[in-house]
Image: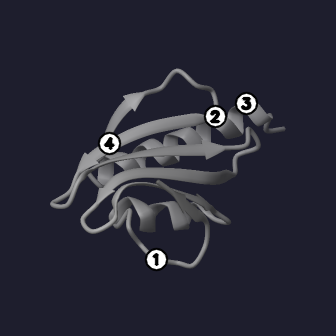
Amino acid sequence: MILFKDIDKVIRHEILSMIKTHGWKLVLKEYPYMIRVRKGFEYSLVTMNIYWNGKGQVKKISTHLDHPKKGKRQMYRTLEKLSELEQYLINPRKHTNKGYSKK
C-alpha cells in the first residue's frame, strides 16, 4: 500500500528532476507542498512557485517576471497534469488562455 506521504516524495522527486533538467535553481524548500525556483532569461529573472496538493498532484504554479512591455507581472495557472509543468519550465511566458495575471 502506498501512503500519501510516499506519493509526496515521488512527486517532489519528479519536480526536482524537471527543474534540474531545464536549468532552474532551487530557492527554498521549507514548505511541505511548495517549491520555489529561479532562472534567468534574456528578458528577466523569473521566479516560479510550484504547488501540489499532498496527494501527488501538481495543482498550481505562480510565475513572477519582468515583462518586456508590461513591467512586473505575476501569473497564476492551474495545472491538470505534471507534463504541463514542464512546458512552463521551458517557457514561463507560454500563453495557454488558462489562469490569470496581476501587476
**Residue positioned 27% across, 68% down in the render:** 69
**Regarding mark 1 in the picture, which secondary structure is present there?**
loop
* Three-letter amino acid code of the residue under disc 1: His
Where is residue 4? Give x, y as percent.
78, 36
> Which amino acid type corresponds to the residue marked 4 in the rendered image?
Arg
Per the image, the residue denoted by label 3 is: 5
- Per the model, the C-alpha gap separating discs 4 and 1 is 19 Å
Q: Residues within 10 Å of mark 4 (few under 14, many from 20)?
A: some
Dot 3 or dot 4: first in sequence order is 3
| Cα gap from disc 3 to disc 4, whole angstroms | 26 Å
**Circle 2 is placed at which residue position?**
33
Question: What residue do we see at 38% from left, 67% from top?
Answer: 93
Q: Is residue 97 left or right of residue 59?
A: left
To which residue does mark 4 refer? 38
Q: Please determine whether, in this image, residue 20 is positioned above or below residue 67.
A: above
Discs 2, 4 touching: Cβ within 8 Å: no
Q: Is label 3 in a helix, a strand or a loop? A: helix
Image marks 4 and 1: residues in contact by CB distance under 8 Å: no
Read off the residue under disc 1: 95
> Is the residue 14 above or below the residue 90 in the image?
above
Residue 49 image offset from top left, x and y in percent: 49, 43
Q: Residues within 10 Å of mark 3 (few under 14, many from 20)?
A: few
In this view of the protein, which residue sits in the foreground, 16 or 92? 92
Kind of residue sitting beneath label 3: Lys
The residues tagged by marks 3 and 1 sit, at their Cα atoms, a distance apart of 33 Å
The amino acid type found where label 2 is placed reads: Tyr
- Residue 88 or residue 57, whichever sits in front: 88
Of pointers 3 and 2, the one earlier in the residue sequence: 3
Of marks 2 and 4, which one's residue comes earlier in the chain? 2
Instruction: Look at 20% across and 61% down and name the residue there.
Output: 43
47 sits to left or right of 23: right
Q: In the image, 79: left or right of 93? A: right
